[in-house]
Image (cartoon, rainbow, N blue to C red):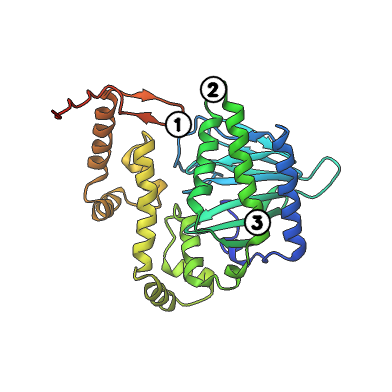
Amino acid sequence: MPENGPPHALFAARSLSKHNRAEMRQALDDAIKLAERNRLPLRVPHGVTPVQNRRGMHYHYRPEFFLGIAGTTEFTFPREDFPLGPGEACIIPAGVPHGEIVRPGAAGEPFRNLVGGFYNNTLSLHLAHEARPGKPDIDVIEFFDAPNLDVFLTLCNSLAQTHAMQGPARDAVLKGLLLALLGLFRNIVETGTGQLNSDIGKVFQAKCLVREQFANPELCVQHIAETLGCSADYLSHLFHTETRERLTHYIQRIRIEGATLALNTTKQTISEIAYASGFADPAYFARVFKQHKGSTPQEYRAQIEAQRQQQEQQPKTVYYDRLDYTHGVPAKKSTGP
């Protein structure tokens, strides 16, 4: 979703009609046929430091999937740009800052993309359109209950990792992973009931909004309540009743998730991470972080670095997708007779 787009677009968008669902099915069927013939290009940004605040860009805690239908999306990243056209797929890994400018097709056909997003046990699929010149937004959206969400996330993450690697079977692995992901999307469009959309509730909407806007230092209960069209007291009570967690605590927890990701994967300073996670005061960020993690950000980063160094010193075999530490460990002598 565009960083500067309407914050309520996720909830104001229409749910899928029979025509929209058929459009999604057709787009996925076409993509599967292309992938089977090794003719579905996959674009993945590379060499990007995750979880950065960049002007004109935004990022998410989970990967996003894009499938070009008509027109072009011009993606911008901190270190590269690339277009996404019809019959092309893109995966943007979690935490990667990006911006989007969209264009109609060469023959004047309106811009159209299919976009997959991921929430807690929920998968969203939406059709994007050009809401304002160059600006994409959600046209229609459906939320699907996805108890197997980890499978979708694993496939997206594996595609991004494999795309960046070299090896004799790289293309075969990419093809298999991409077909599996497209097939799962296709199945959920076919069999998903869509009932979640009518029963989404303000608690789910609040969670979605926090995850979309967590880097905004002005995000607060009052801001969320105004977006959802209710009072702050009502929303706070409803959220606590349904989740047994206060909304203010949830906002902090999601921001700390982002900060933890940044501490694990970037060399940003503590102050930079604080600002990128929606905290206006680095000292306050440090206090909140310690409340959630039991250590200061500096201590947490030192612990992670110590664990990495310890692992580096262990004998291991490096595979394209994992590290195996079992080799090099002396076998225990038999104690039998």
Q: Residue at x 40, y 52 (%)?
A: 278
Tell me if label 3 and label 1 are in contact, CB under 8 Å.
Answer: no
Report the Cα–Cα distance between label 2 and label 3: 33 Å
Which three-letter amino acid code belongs to the residue tagged 2? Gln
Locate residue 197: give its quadrant: bottom right
Residue 100 position within the rendered picture, expressed as x and y whole percent measured from the top left: 63, 44
Q: Which mark is residue 321?
A: 1
Is label 1 in a helix, a strand or a loop? loop
Evaluate whether residue 135 shows in this view: yes
Q: Which mark is residue 166?
A: 2
Q: Residue at x 22, y 51 (%)?
A: 294
Locate residue 156: give its quadrant: top right
- Mark 3 or 1 closer to N-term? 3
User: Where 169 sits versus 112, above or below?
Assistant: above
Residue located farthest toward the front when viewing the structure as drawn? 337
Tell me if label 1 and label 2 are in contact, CB under 8 Å.
Answer: no
Q: Is residue 167 left or right of residue 238?
A: right
- Mark 1 or 2 closer to N-term? 2
- Quadrant of image for the C terminus: top left
Residue 251 position within the rendered picture, expressed as x and y whole percent measured from the top left: 39, 60
- Between 93 and 223, the residue placed more toward the observer is 93
For disc 1, the neighbor class at 10 Å (few under 14, some 14 to 19, many from 20) is few
- Between 295 and 314, the residue placed more toward the observer is 314
For disc 2, the neighbor class at 10 Å (few under 14, some 14 to 19, many from 20) is few
Is label 3 in a helix, a strand or a loop? strand
Residue corresponding to mark 3:
126
- Which of discs 3 and 1 lies nearer the camera? The answer is 1
